[in-house]
Amino acid sequence: MTDHTFDIVILGGGSGGYAAAIRASELGKSVALIEKDKVGGTCLHRGCIPTKALLHAAEVADTTRTAPSIGVKAQFDGIDMPGVTAYREGIVAKKFKGLEGLLKARGITVVSGEGRLASANSVAVGDDIYSGTDIILATGSYSRSLPGLEIGGRVLTSEHALALGEVPGRVLVLGGGVIGVEFASVWRSFGAEVTIIEALPHLVPNEDEAVSKTLERAFRRRGITYSLGVRFQSVTQSATGVTVTLEDGTVHEGDYLLVAVGRGPATDGLGFEAAGVALERGFVTVDERLRTTVPGIWAVGDITPGLQLAHRGFAQGIFVAEEIAGLAPIVVPDLEIPKVTYCDPEVASVGLTEAQAIEARGADAIESYNYNLAGNGKSEIIGTAGMIKVVREKAGPVIGVHMVGARVGELIGEAQLVVGWDAHPEDIAPFIHAHPTQNEALGEAFLALAGKPLHAL
Ligand SMILES: Cc1cc2nc3c(=O)[nH]c(=O)nc-3n(C[C@H](O)[C@H](O)[C@H](O)COP(=O)(O)OP(=O)(O)OC[C@H]3O[C@@H](n4cnc5c(N)ncnc54)[C@H](O)[C@@H]3O)c2cc1C
């Protein structure tokens, strides 16, 4: 048994863990980052980056298909899946190499191996013990399934779906949340018949209802079919396909079923509870300063309850490193974290939905405005429909922004500043938005709420 001592020992080298490692080393701490697979975690290897590469390939396919309609000669000849895979893997490999180099340059000790919390201040990796004044848990999440729904064969998780070497002819997607609609969007652009099965009444059910309805209309126009409000009952599979039965008896058939019903915290069997770290439904219990129930042990990223997003993991990792260093950073505000769903059209939001705002403040205290992208020149040029909804307190700040339309994810930065800084539409109205940009549509919504609409009524 060999003992290694560091200021900080981090278990898990994904978004949350490696961000904590980088910030802690910047602050002069010695850091061991323990990773059983590859640093970069889900986001880099199985999540954000590879799926966005697929979505970009999907966008190029659609652009090629529609090119003749705007006078550009091009012909869509189909998807070369090995080519798409090489492109996707190339992007991931480059980012992985960059991250490894960054961690090395920062003097972070990356330990390859499966770690287990051994005590309140140490992690065991095989026969080695890594001790730290502080320990940060960042073991991430895994694809969940439903009771009785077994993964395997033609029943896929997002990891299997990423690795699929073919474009399916017909595919079923169980779950209309972020991961489900992104894969549905890719496969449709690649030429598949796609059906999404969602038990709740809407696609992207955590978004403002107006956004969900606009996305549903857009998906319908794209030929993506969906079943809403009926729960999954069972699936059977043969050598060539899957058959899904819903609780109302409806039957759907496809070549594959993607199970995208959410992600669970990867906390099982890692010694957390034995060391005194409390869990709730598998998630690590933390206070707003990300302290677990054991002093000196912290948790960040998908294992903590809340939004499972890479940039939340980064922010939490940085927060904990700064907190350990005594910098008293401001708490990571879950409500002000921007969310983007990268399907076509994109969905982007920050803050409260209108329904949440009404529930929190009462209907009389809330005002909202929907700006239709039909009034926005740039959206017309790139051929997208959609809308931007701004929710404010009456005579008060903007508390929610909700957008749907091609490329609206790129607009979330301004929306996030407005919500995060409690800006009133009247404060923002004087800021000039460049013409013609989609960004102007946000400006138009703020102008309208400030009582002076321009390209709107
Ligand atoms: C298909 C998909 C698409 C996504 N797209 C986006 C997106 O576009 N934008 C976005 O913000 N988020 C996206 N996410 C979510 C994002 O990937 C996660 O929120 C993020 O990766 C969480 O970071 P984390 O550090 O908590 O965990 P992870 O990234 O899961 O990292 C945890 C790391 O810990 C390691 N580990 C676990 N147990 C041990 C152990 N015992 N010993 C050593 N190492 C261990 C794992 O190998 C892993 O590398 C997506 C997720 C998926 C699945």
Image (spheres, helix red, strand yellow):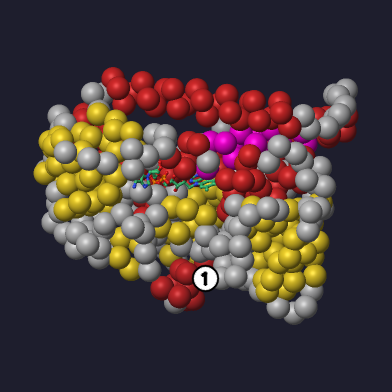
Counting from the top left corner in percent of width and height, residue 414 is at 46, 42
Q: How many marks?
A: 1
Residue segment shown in magenta? 47-63
Could you tell me if residue 47 is visible in this image? yes
**Nearer to me, 28 or 13:** 13
- Judging from the image, what secondary structure is the residue with disc 1 in? helix
Give the dominant element type of the magenta stretch: helix, strand or loop. helix
Counting from the top left corner in percent of width and height, residue 416 is at 43, 47
Counting from the top left corner in percent of width and height, residue 264 is at 45, 59
**Nearer to me, 415 or 430:** 415
Residue at image point 29% right, 38% down: 34
> Residue 187's quadrant in the figure?
top right
What kind of residue is marked 1?
Ala
Residue at image point 43% right, 52% down: 141
> Residue 55's quadrant in the figure?
top right
> Residue 267's quadrant in the figure?
bottom left
Give the image quadrant in which the ligand numbered 1 is located.
Answer: top left
Could you tell me if residue 437 is visible in this image? no
Other residues around mark 1 within 10 Å, as few (<14) / some (14–19) / many (≥20): some
Viewport quadrant of the N terminus: top left
Seen in the image, is 279 located left or right of residue 324? right
Q: Is residue 44 above or below residue 142?
A: above
Tell me if residue 315 is in the magenta stretch: no
The residue that label 1 is drawn on is 355
Counting from the top left corner in percent of width and height, residue 29 is at 15, 32
Tell me if residue 52 is in the magenta stretch: yes
Viewport quadrant of the C terminus: bottom right
